[in-house]
Image: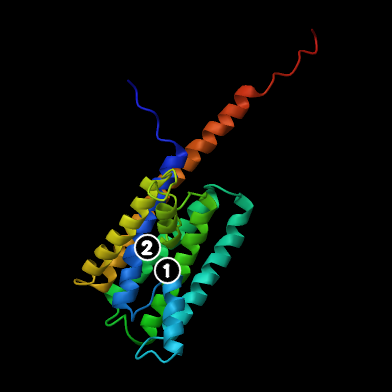
Amino acid sequence: MKRDRLTTERLHLILMLALTFSTGVVDAVGYLGLDRVFTGNMTGNVVILGMALAGGASLPVLRPALALLGFMFGAAVAGRLLRPDGPGWGSRSSGAFLAVAAGLAALAAVAFLVPEADRGPTGTVVTTVLAILMGVQAATARRLKVTDVTTVVVTSTIVGLSSESRLAGGTGGFWRRRSLAVVLILLGALAGGTALRWHLGLGLALSAALTAAVVGVGHARHRKDAHTAARGRLDVTPLSPDRHS
């Protein structure tokens, strides 16, 4: 029996789950390797800033604040650039994700080439640019409308998983994707923390490679779907009546 073709919707789910893993890697690199800064999970930065302003001992202020502003800037820029395409994956979505992959690769190169890239002004620039890239990623992923997979945070996913579970009297809908999102961001953080044992740039390089793979697969499917849609429109176009009939 022939298997059903992988639908575009399911493929987008798989790709966003891959980016969720990638975000776990990036956040582990930021928090453990770059002075306790979250570059994807902005809730963490807001909490850190609140505790630091309350007098929390040795908590960072500058980098989390710049990361928060950078994330908002990246999301705003992506939102404006993606608006003409509308919801779903478009050519601009591919460009946005490609920019994220290229940015991550550039930061990985900086980490490998610049001694002590985690310190001083260089470290601040790295965390800020990382946050901008994650803002772009989050805004682009949001346009795809993959239920309960934002790629950058799983708090709402955990709420949905628990409050709509059969134990809570719900239907347990989307429990697989919700569980996978939580597990993958956990595994991503594990991979990022492990990569730091070798080098700061290793986790960034891994995230860049994953994001590039997502771009390649997603853009190929977008072009295929666009071609199929165009061919379908041609097939249903009525023929012009014969003037001589």
Q: Is residue 154 left or right of residue 87?
A: left
Toward the viewer: 69 or 154?
154
Q: Quadrant of residue 124?
A: bottom left
Residue position for label 1: 41
Q: Is residue 93 left or right of residue 16?
A: right
Residue at image point 41% right, 74% down:
44
Check disc 1: other Cα within 10 Å, few if <14, some if 14-19, many if 20+: many
Classify the position of the C terminus by image quarter: top right
Instruction: Name the outermost residue toward the left.
Output: 198
Figure disc tally: 2
Toward the viewer: 97 or 243?
97
* Place of residue 134 in the rendered image (x, y in percent of width and height, measured from the top left): 44, 65
Residue position for label 2: 23
Mark 1 residue type? Asn
* Badge 1 or badge 2: first in the primary sequence: 2
* Place of residue 179 in the rendered image (x, y in percent of width and height, measured from the top left): 35, 51
The reply to whether discs 1 and 2 touch (Cβ–Cβ < 8 Å) is: yes
Residue at image point 37% right, 82% down:
122
Mark 2 residue type? Thr
Instruction: Name the outermost residue toward the top.
Output: 245
Residue at image point 27% right, 73% down:
200
Residue at image point 46% right, 60% down:
137
